[in-house]
Image (tube, rainbow, N blue to C red):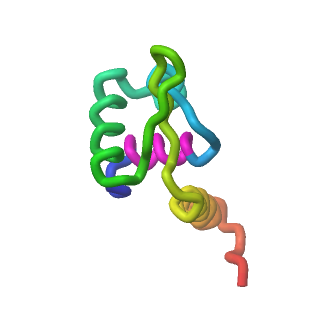
Amino acid sequence: MLSDPTRLHLLWILAQGPSDVTALTELSGASRTAVSQHLAKLRFTGMVDTTRDGRRVVYQIVDGHLARLVREGFNYADHRVTGEPSHR
């Protein structure tokens, strides 16, 4: 699930906090159809969950450990790209 760039981007956005499809589409730059399909896969695997807010469906990462994994993965990549030394 984490190998697809769009899904990883969606998880990174959701690691910052819950969001609906409209916001995820705007923030990710992907089409609404693509975002919906990726969210369905993430939901099927149990990585994200939904709640209803009126007519809106709000997505969130199901576990703080997963959110931390996503954030740490991006931090690691950032260190590799910028050349900043790793934390020991």
Q: Examine the structure image and report whether residue 75 is included in the region drawn in magenta.
A: no
Q: Position of residue 13 (x, y in %)?
A: 55, 40
Residue 81 visible, this orientation: no
In the image, residue 48 sits, relative to residue 57, either above or below, namely below
Residue 59 visible, this orientation: yes
Q: Which residue is painted at 51% across and 48% down in the image?
A: 61
Q: Chief secondary structure of the magenta span?
A: helix
For the magenta stretch, what is the residue range? Answer: 6-14
Tally of marks:
0
Q: Is residue 5 left or right of residue 40?
A: right
Q: Which residue is painted at 64% across and 65% down in the image?
A: 79
Name the quadrant of the N terminus: bottom left
Name the quadrant of the C terminus: bottom right
Q: Is residue 35 left or right of residue 60?
A: left
Out of 39 and 12, give the one closest to the viewer: 39
Farthest bottom residue in view: 88
Residue 81 placement: quadrant:
bottom right
Q: Which residue is painted at 34% across and 45% down in the image?
A: 43
In the image, residue 83 sits, relative to residue 35, either above or below, namely below
Q: Position of residue 2 (x, y in %)?
A: 37, 56
Residue 75 placement: quadrant:
bottom right
